[in-house]
């Protein structure tokens, strides 16, 4: 069982069958922590799969609360909703922090994963739950990368996808930020090449990596609104003792300190490595060939201020996936807008699913043909 904060509602499914991994190794059985909401229909055809972001968990109804509920885009009265913790993470699923079959933890023995491996594990869980048709796969950020792979790996079962704040392949920009985080983590002498004792983990390095990531998840306007000099005294932390105790420093330190209590360093590396490997075109004749083979209705959502996966990357997805719809959320919060401003896309997702008439407030909803002329 995980020492990290797994909600009591999380259930655990164990596969005794090994998982052959894309990069050549295998897992000799694995566990996925997962949660469900609603009832699976007798025909097994009303599933919705929710895929979480890098540090998320199976608790989708909590971190994506604005999308969930009666009459909402994701409705437990209509849908059988499944969210599983990603393989490689530490909220109930097998990852580097999990026990190794031969004793101790997997740690540096954990094999290299890809986004496709994570999705294949989720597909096996869907099989075990008796799911025959999936009405929608939806996810943001890492969850969006998984959603694209779901469409390509399980085309017979997946009926539609909603891909949010994601890209066809990880950009050099994203990979460079991952590397800055790896360098910070590895610079902590307590990291010890990944073979750190559980009770003396590299918290300084992991916290620094999270602080770097937090800046990339927001936008200049978002941080300035909250902590900028125009806000006068609020530029300084409420607990400021020194003239340079800027509030934004306090915010970053707070996130760094919180994160090391809820995440494992090797799991973090496993997940960012998997994200950096992401390329839907790999082994499929290139990005355009892969995307143009997607036959399911697709909703591609961009966050207007996302500097990490900028809207141009979602426009590219939309241009290559036949008939895809492009939606831009007006959010000042950058990449994290898909969490912080989730309410702004709820009606549009409902409309895409055919359960609401209008796209709602705070979002533009345009057809693929219009993307070429879309000026932001
Ligand atoms: C088991 C799990 O937790 S995993 C499942 C949930 N987590 C996820 O899905 C991961 C993704 N989540 C996130 O990245 C974030 O939580 C978000 C994006 C959803 C929410 O972001 P926001 O609500 O905007 O929070 P924000 O980044 O402003 O941080 C607020 C925190 O910073 C603190 N803070 C803000 N300014 C300062 C400051 N100057 N000094 C110190 N602390 C500060 C606040 O007190 C608050 O603390 P709290 O979270 O302990 O209550
Ligand atoms: N803030 C989110 C988004 C990362 O893409 C997370 O930590 O999972």
Image (spheres, grey):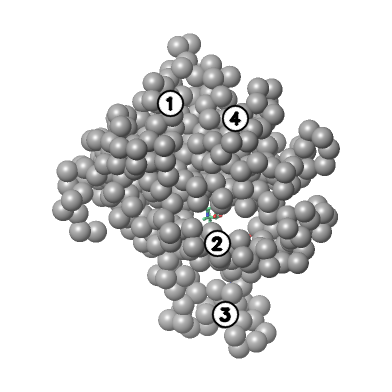
Mark 4 or 2, nearer chain start: 4
**Quadrant position of residue 324:** top left
Q: Is residue 279 left or right of residue 121?
A: left
Q: From mark 3 to mark 1, how far is it between C-alphas?
A: 49 Å
Q: From mark 1 to mark 4, how far is it between C-alphas?
A: 17 Å
| Labelled disc at residue 154 | 1
Q: From mark 3 to mark 2, how far is it between C-alphas?
A: 26 Å
**Quadrant position of residue 70:** top left
Q: From mark 1 to mark 2, how far is it between C-alphas?
A: 31 Å
For numbered disc 1, what is the local secondary structure?
A: loop
Q: Contact, CB < 8 Å: mark 3 with mark 1?
A: no
The outermost residue toward the bottom is 243
Q: Residue at x 53, y 16 (%)?
A: 130
For discs 3 and 1, the disc positioned in front in the rendered view = 1
Mark 1 or 4, nearer chain start: 4
Q: Which residue is drawn at 69% across and 58% down?
A: 260
Rendered location of residue 370, percent (x, y) = 17, 47
Residue bearing mark 4? 20
User: How many other residues sit within 10 Å of disc 3, few (<14), some (14-19) or many (≥20)?
Assistant: many
For numbered disc 2, what is the local secondary structure?
A: helix
Residue bearing mark 2? 179
Residue bearing mark 3? 246
Mark 3 or 4, nearer chain start: 4
């Amino acid at each position: 069982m995980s020492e990290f904060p797994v909600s009591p509602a999380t259930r655990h499914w164990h596969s005794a069958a090994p998982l052959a991994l894309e990069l050549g190794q295998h897992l000799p059985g694995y566990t996925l922590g997962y949660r469900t909401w609603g009832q699976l229909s007798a025909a097994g055809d009303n599933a919705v799969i929710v895929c979480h972001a890098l540090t998320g968990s199976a608790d989708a109804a909590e971190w994506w609360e604005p999308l969930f509920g009666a009459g909402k885009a994701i409705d437990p009265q209509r849908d059988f909703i499944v969210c599983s913790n990603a393989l490689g993470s530490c909220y109930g699923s097998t990852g580097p922090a999990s026990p190794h079959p031969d004793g101790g933890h997997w740690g540096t023995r954990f094999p290299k994963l890809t986004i496709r491996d994570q999705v294949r594990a989720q597909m096996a869980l869907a099989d075990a739950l008796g799911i025959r048709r999936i009405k929608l796969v939806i996810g943001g950020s890492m969850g969006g990368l998984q959603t694209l792979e779901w469409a390509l790996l399980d085309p017979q079962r997946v009926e539609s996808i909603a891909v949010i704040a994601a890209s066809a392949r990880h950009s050099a920009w994203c990979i460079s930020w991952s590397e800055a985080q790896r360098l910070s983590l590895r610079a902590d002498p307590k990291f010890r090449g990944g073979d750190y004792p559980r009770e003396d983990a590299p918290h300084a390095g992991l916290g620094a990596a999270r602080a770097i990531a937090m800046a990339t998840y927001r936008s200049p306007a978002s941080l300035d609104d909250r902590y900028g000099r125009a806000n006068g005294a609020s530029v300084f932390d409420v607990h400021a003792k020194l003239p340079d105790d800027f509030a934004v420093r306090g915010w970053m330190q707070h996130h760094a300190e919180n994160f090391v209590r809820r995440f494992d360093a090797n799991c973090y590396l496993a997940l960012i490595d998997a994200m950096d490997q992401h390329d839907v075109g790999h082994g499929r004749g290139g990005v355009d060939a892969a995307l143009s083979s997607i036959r399911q209705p697709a909703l591609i959502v961009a966050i207007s201020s996302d500097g990490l996966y900028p809207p141009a990357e979602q426009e590219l997805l939309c241009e290559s996936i036949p008939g895809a719809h492009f939606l831009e959320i007006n959010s000042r919060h950058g990449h994290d807008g898909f969490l912080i401003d989730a309410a702004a896309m709820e009606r549009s997702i409902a409309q895409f699913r055919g359960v609401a008439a209008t796209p709602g407030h705070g979002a533009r909803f345009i057809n693929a043909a219009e993307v070429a002329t879309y000026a932001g």
